[in-house]
Amino acid sequence: MKKLSALALLFAFCACLPGEAFAADGGRPSILGALWKWAPLLLSGFAFNLLISVLAMALGTVLGAVLGLGLVAPSSGLRRTSHAATQFFRNAPWLVLLFFCMYLMPFEFVVGGAVVPFPGWVKAVIGFALPVMANTAEIVRGAVQSIPPAQWEAAESLSFTRRQTLWMVILPQCVKRMLPSWMNLYSLVTMATSLASVVGVSEMLTLTADALAAEGGRTDLMAPFYGFVLFCFFVYCYPIGVWTRRLEARYAVK
């Protein structure tokens, strides 16, 4: 079914192209010819989108797990601090956080007399990791609080410390409950990486604009080129959504 859906989308995309898409016009390549010529560059940009999303998810997941455990900590001060940080980054616009990281962080560091550059794509990773951190913290909090209190009581009766209870009893049970929400968050982050084009990161959307400019600003190429971008994101993110729904049904708490 997944292959049929992807093929149907590709067929619909080709069917929407004008008749001139398959024929060259004078010295200019046809629409499909131009798309074929620039496809390797655009796909390399899409791979960069995926790299940014994976790194942002990795960094945000680690920080979010720590922040999420702070939301359920015994200390009221730690809970309030974690709650404030979670709500701030969870409700801040992603693009604003991206601008904040891009233009307020230094462009280079001086370490031991050597100048170490701080590239824009690393700032973009940090900018996306901040909302991932906040949303992951809420996922962790919800999963921990969904565990029945009897689990805590049983561990306490066995003289487990709170840390032992978390690592050996509670968190292993939380993984299945967190996985569908975490995968859905990853899909959202992958689609949001296109925002990095606004701050000059050379990802797929930026390279698409560069390719159109190199073709002399042909207006007949805009819909096919941006349609190709849409197609790539759909083919990658749609299976994640299907898998997420299956995991939700499989790991549903009854």
Image (cartoon, rainbow, N blue to C red):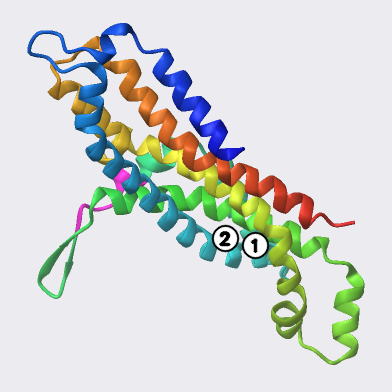
Tell me what residue is drawn at x 77 percent, y 79 percent.
169
Disc 1 residue type (three-letter): Gly
Residue 139 in magenta?
A: no
On the rendered structure, is 110 left or right of 69?
left
Q: Secondary structure at mark 2?
A: helix
On the rendered structure, is 195 left or right of 154?
left
Circle on res. 2: none
Q: Quadrant of the C terminus?
A: bottom right
Tell me what residue is drawn at x 49 percent, y 44 percent.
189
On the rendered structure, is 238 left or right of 181?
left
Q: Nearer the viewer, residue 232 or 59?
A: 232
Circle on res. 64: 2
Q: Position of residue 72 (x, y in %)?
A: 73, 65
Residue 107 in magenta?
A: yes
What residue does disc 1 label?
68
Q: Position of residue 36 (x, y in %)?
A: 24, 30
Q: Nearer the viewer, residue 248 or 34?
A: 34
Q: Which residues are magenta?
A: 101-108
Q: Quadrant of the N terminus?
A: top right
Determine the image quadrant of residue 231: top left
Q: Position of residue 182 (x, y in %)?
A: 61, 54
Tell me what residue is drawn at x 46 percent, y 61 percent.
59
Q: CA distance from mark 1 to mark 2?
A: 6 Å
Q: Position of residue 181 (x, y in %)?
A: 66, 51
Q: Are marks 1 and 2 in contact (CB under 8 Å)?
A: yes
Disc 2 residue type (three-letter): Gly
